[in-house]
Image (cartoon, grey):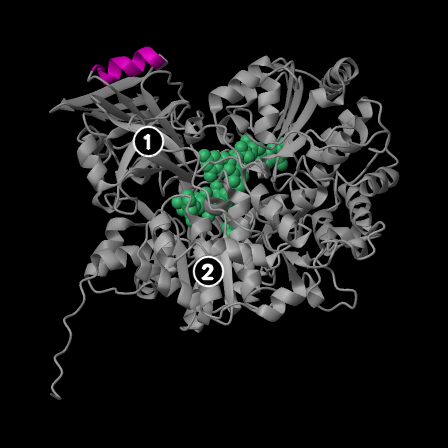
Amino acid sequence: MTLAKEAVAQNRPYSAQSVCAYCGVGCGVEIDMKDEQPKSIRGTSDHPANFGRLCVKGQHLLDTIGYEDRLLYPEINHQRASWAEAVEEAAKGLSNIITKHGPEAVAFYVSGQLLTEDYYLANKLMKGYIGSANIDTNSRLCMSSAVAAYKRAFGEDVVPCDYEDLEQTDLLILIGSNAAWTHPVLYQRMERAKRLNPDMRVVLVDPRRTASAELSDQFLQIKPGSDAGLYNGLLNYLTQHNGLDQAFLEQYTEHYDAAIEASQHWSLQRTAEFCGVLESELKQFYHWFLSSERVVSFYSMGINQSSSGVDKCQAIINAHLASGKILRPGCGPFSITGQPNAMGGREVGGLANQLTAHMELQDPDDRARVQNYWQSPAMANKPGKMAVDMFSEIAAGNIKAVWIMATNPLVSLPNRPDVIRALERCELVIVSECVDKSDTLPFADIKFPASAWLEKNGTVTNSERRISRQRGLIPSPAEAKPDWEIIADVAQAMGFSGFDYQHPAEIFDEWVKLTAHENQDRRQLNLGELGDLSLSEYDQLKPVQWPLSKNGGRAKPFEQKRFSTASGKARLFAIEPKLPKQVVDAAFPFLMNSGRLRDQWHTMSRTGRSASLNGHIDRPYIYINPKDAITLGVKPGGLIKAASRISEVTAFAQISDDIASGQCFMPIHWSEQFASSANVSNLYASIVDPISGQPESKQAAVKLEAVGCGQFIQIYSKAELPFHEGLCVKSRGHYGFHYLLAFQAQSHHVVKYLQKRFQADGEWLSFSSGGTENVVCLGDGDVMLLAFSGEQAPDISKEWLDQLFAKESLTLEDIQSVLRRRADEAFEQGPKVCSCFNVHQKTIVDEIQLGASSVEELGRRLRCGSNCGSCKPELSQLISTHHIPQSCPVSESA
Ligand SMILES: Nc1nc2c(c(=O)[nH]1)N[C@H]1C(S)=C(S)[C@@H](COP(=O)(O)OP(=O)(O)OC[C@H]3O[C@@H](n4cnc5c(=O)[nH]c(N)nc54)[C@H](O)[C@@H]3O)O[C@H]1N2
Ligand SMILES: Nc1nc2c(c(=O)[nH]1)N[C@H]1C(S)=C(S)[C@@H](COP(=O)(O)OP(=O)(O)OC[C@H]3O[C@@H](n4cnc5c(=O)[nH]c(N)nc54)[C@H](O)[C@@H]3O)O[C@H]1N2
Ligand code: SF4
Ligand SMILES: [Mo]
């Protein structure tokens, strides 16, 4: 018996190891358990991804695990059903469609948030049993361009870098990545490396100044989508300045002449024009690349989410191959994965154009090998439909059934109106979900309740190919089940053998042995050494990185510089840089960029539950440049509408120099569950990269318009309230729900409006003055609801309101403060910057003005930034804005 099991048996507190639910850094977490409940969480000190660190999302994981809002029972046509009925209905539905229309008429749309065991089974069912490759994943929207480029260049989808390389490099190029917010623990590792090695340089390449600029020695604010030009220019510069590693090129690569020749047209002048930067800036950057012994290009969605994403990745790979700055410590083209198990999905073949275990769908030997191993009745023999095409085929009626698992396509695929049309037309929509409300769920004919993080048992692989165990420590609520079990149940009900598993360890065993099956060193992905683990060995599996070393030491990808291509050589390609296909014109003059915020995860189904995480940025903004704000007549905090040819959204205006004139930016997080009309993916056309099928989700042409607003109402209510009119944003407080409503006209008498809407009995008190109204609703002496209205968005401190709701009952003084809208001064501290210690902007600015001139000093004085460190870039930004330098002492030695 393991120590943890013994402790559970004796009901003693114990600590368990698992892995964070969020990003592809894959941080280890240690969770203190007592009475079968998690009590506290911290980073695992010896996990090689994080060595004890956690970012703010990881710190707050335990806020998000409650059983509220969970999908608890299976449903058929939105009515509760038993598991047997729902499984039977799904199996029958899929089988009937396959019988009538063939295997290509069904599809699975899965996710990088599934565990490897889930993912492997879904792929096995579709490719080996149904016999179609119509299984694709939300990773198509995420890193399929990076995958396609690695495969093209190296013959296999292998990331040739480790996290350590980030610390050992001389020049780190963050291109199309806002790691400070999206891979915060790696960003902290970069920051520390730079502190320890002051000669290390960081260059940020992004059309938008982000929090990651704080670490950068140079910020190249390029024109959107011009990255391949930047790297072609670099290759040309290297050629001209004796920067090619001729020996490496000749021995280990092929097709380099064509790539170098294509780059010759990319003079400094042409590149500067194409990228919209100065020639002097380019020279600086190129010189650093040339003269640095070790260089890493760290790239993410700003590169991948493009109609020419594969070429952009290749342009980056070209420069590293050509200069020999690859397969050495501190070197390489490092594509970083987004989701916790995006890499696991790549391994098991979750993409429609992959087989499994890095084998090829197009290769008859590989197909026979896998079919033989599975002993399966069928085998897909051609690539299936990639995500965007899959939904077009559904809309066209060619695909008639889709099973969606662990992703929310209404919110994350481009062109929401098309996705809606597709799902409305689809005969059978099955959705496996943890939560009971999402934008996608209303379209489900069958809903399967899935177990969530901390309930699920299995493995995930992070961005540096390290496999960690995610452990199920608490029971699933009601009838929720792990995804692998749901897939196995449906497969068996469809009459397939080969899905009779009792435990994810059995699936893991089958999977790792498949990677070794007839491998003969052709594929780097060979996990055979992990086969035949006992249950307790699987349970206690320590983080392990592939390629596994045969002698127990450390193996690196492509050792001996032998790649997985037929010739063993890496390939360069001639790149012709292309700009985005979604272009601005007179009618749609702004380019809409989209991306992530520090404290939210995707469609907020998890982070949206944490009041602390909602404190950082609590509403959807459209970020615009001050010049454009003047032209458009938009005021800070006012509303702004963005409309593309596809659809429109409305959000609050955030005016900032960080964004270039003519561009705007919107976070991806607000689905209709949290805001009435702020789902940015709405705006994007279904334009994809021709090779990878990855959508161009960073550039949409829009027109912007100020939205006049006569009345805003801010509400904090104990109960969840339905709103259907005006613009509404919802967020969680510690004791209830915050709402911000906006109406075009000053039309509502707040008490009457709320009474009519919610028929809340109770005692209503209100005070109006100068166009504002403040309302208290009490029920049995308890505060039920507080509301504030006015012509401007009220922005009452949510922490103050939380604190009022925390009280047993309000004092007369509290009620008067609400009615006069006068929060305690302690709460009037502006937006929250440090979510760990609840430190707000005004407190920090005051401290800076009192002389705190470094992030460390602020940490000593206020504690902000001294825990997870996620807010450090913002602290340093506040210092550069508000610090008044002491005047220089005059030298007396003259
Ligand atoms: N807090 C948080 N962290 C996350 C996630 C989350 O939801 N929240 N999601 C995870 C996932 S799945 C992913 S994929 C990663 C994504 O991680 P990132 O790729 O770092 O995140 P994004 O904000 O989508 O985009 C990165 C940057 O690309 C820039 N960009 C836009 N167009 C261009 C361009 O043409 N060229 C260049 N060079 N840059 C451009 C954007 O301005 C943005 O700053 O984050 C992961 N981590
Ligand atoms: N415009 C624009 N669009 C984008 C992006 C962008 O930058 N710009 N980024 C793209 C990228 S990189 C990504 S990764 C996608 C992300 O987009 P999505 O995958 O749609 O986002 P999530 O909110 O993570 O959706 C996961 C869903 O699965 C559920 N879930 C969580 N865990 C489990 C589980 O274990 N089992 C089951 N069955 N369900 C579970 C959650 O409740 C949630 O509803 O968005 C893409 N879309
Ligand atoms: S960086 Fe943060 S979100 Fe990503 S795995 Fe680590 S703790 Fe989780
Ligand atoms: Mo992603």
Number of other residues with Cα within 10 Å of mark 1, as a class: few under 14, some 14 to 19, many 20 or more: some
Does residue 733 appear to the left or right of 544 in the view shown? left
Q: Which mark is residue 679?
A: none
Label 2: state its secondary structure.
helix
Overall secondary structure of the magenta section: helix
Residue underneath mark 2: 236
Q: Nearest the camera: 344 or 834?
A: 344
**Residue 725 falls in image quadrant:** top left
Does residue 533 appear to the left or right of 564 in the view shown? right
- Total labels: the figure holds 2
* Magenta residue check for 211: no
Q: Give the extent of the magenta segment.
A: 747-757
Number of other residues with Cα within 10 Å of mark 2, as a class: few under 14, some 14 to 19, many 20 or more: many
Residue underneath mark 1: 809
Q: How far from the left and from the top, in percent, is residue 698?
A: 43, 38
Q: Amino acid at mark 1?
A: Ser
Considering only vertical position in the picture, is 137 above or below 518? Answer: above
* Magenta residue check for 753: yes
Q: Is mark 1 within 8 Å of ligand 2?
A: no
Q: Is residue 188 visible to the viewer in this orientation of the structure?
A: no
